[in-house]
Image: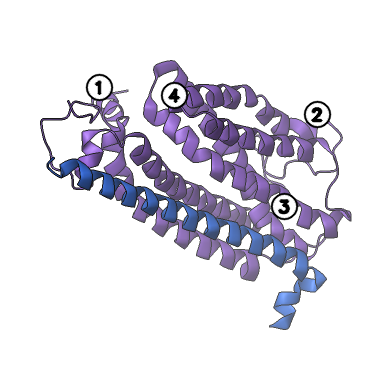
Amino acid sequence: MALKDSIAWYHFSAPKNFYPLAGKVIPWFWGLTIALLLVGLYLSFFVAPTDYKQGESYRIIYIHVPAAWMSMLIYLVMAIYAIIGLAWKVRLADMMASALAPTGAMFTFLALWTGAFWGKPTWGTYWVWDARLTSELILLFLYIGFISLQSAIDDPRRAAKASGLLAIVGVINLPIIYFSVQWWNTLHQGASVSPTMAPKMATIMLTTMLIMTFAFWMYTIVIVLMRVRRIILERERQTSWVMELFGAEASGEKDEKGERK
Amino acid sequence: MSEFFAMGGHGFYIWVSYAVTALLMMIEVIAVIRGKRTVEKRLTRLARTLSRPE
């Protein structure tokens, strides 16, 4: 990495500098989200043809697969932030991990929910205890555990430590979800799209699925940036930059933590 | 039109999936915006008390 880049990374790892940057990029990611969603939904319902085997109900995969991918991707990113937070004591990394968890939990729930409503007309059941479904349910519990640990511990630093450890240990579940359809004889079908093989689906269906995935991805960036801005304000409320942001007069009377001398 | 919503008899499953997805996303957006506003209001009050001379 060039020196210039590493200085930029260092600069924006300070909540004080990241807060305005996040505020500036949020509208752009909103634009991307809405544009991709409109195109994705149009393709999902009006362009993609009826599946010759599953009929119309397969259209659920255009939200099911992106939600399931995002549930795993968000967990991975959350765990990476947890590692950065624990190893290098970067406060912003802890805040990012906290900001990612609720959205990750939501996508995990949606993957399970849309999967159930796809399973009913296709398999004849909403739920089976097969390896893919069960490991995805465990992912939901990991997110819920992470969120509950954070709200149970008052001190933000200790909360980040405990929940960060949980997030890191829980990463073991990700390969289990991903490979479950190969390792076990599951009712859930194998991967239709994988990095090593040509996709086993029509190009238009694949394109639609990828556009919906990018739409969910951009949505995640928007919502996480919005949430992390709130978290920054809450945790940095004792600093002079936050107080100045909200109209308190800049004064030399306060020390770095914003406490009056 | 009604044929579109029927989705070859699978309309119920499709619309429940899409509706719940849309609903949860909208709730999340509203919750995040409201949460931030609450914090901002509190901080504005706090900043006012700090800048008032004692």
Q: Residue furthest bottom?
A: B1
Q: Residue at x 42, y 55 (%)?
A: B33
Q: Is residue A2 left or right of residue A201?
A: left
Three-letter code, disc 4:
Arg
Q: Where residue A195 sits in the image (x, y, percent)? A: 63, 36
Disc 1 with disc 4 on a shared chain: yes
What's the distance in space between the residues labelled 1 and 4, CA to CA?
A: 30 Å
Foreground residue, A57 or A232? A232
Mark 3 crowdedness (10 Å alpha carbons): few <14, some 14-19, many ≥20: some
Q: CA distance from mark 2 to mark 3?
A: 24 Å
What residue is at 15 percent from the left and 45 percent from the top? B52
The residue labelled by disc 4 is A157
Lower position in the chain sequence, tag 2 or tag 4: 4
Residue A195 seen in render: no
The type of residue carrying mark 3 is: Trp
Callout 2 amino acid: Trp
Numbered disc 4: what chain?
Answer: A
Q: Residues at marks 2 and 3, common chain?
A: yes
For image coordinates 63% across by 33% down, the residue present is: A145
- Callouts 2 and 3 close, C-beta under 8 Å: no
In-front residue for pair A215/A112 = A112
Same chain, marks 4 and 3?
Answer: yes
What is the letter of the purple chain?
A: A
What residue sits right under mark 2 in the picture? A183
Crowdedness near tag 1: few (<14), some (14–19) or many (≥20) residues, C-alpha within 10 Å: few
| Colour in which chain B is drawn | blue
The chain ID associated with circle 3 is: A
User: Pointers 2 and 1 in contact (CB under 8 A)?
Assistant: no
Q: Give the CA separation, mark 2 to mark 4.
A: 39 Å
The residue to which callout 3 is attached is A113
Q: Please tell me in which quadrant of the rendered image residue A12 appears.
A: top left
- Image quarter of the N terminus of chain A: top left
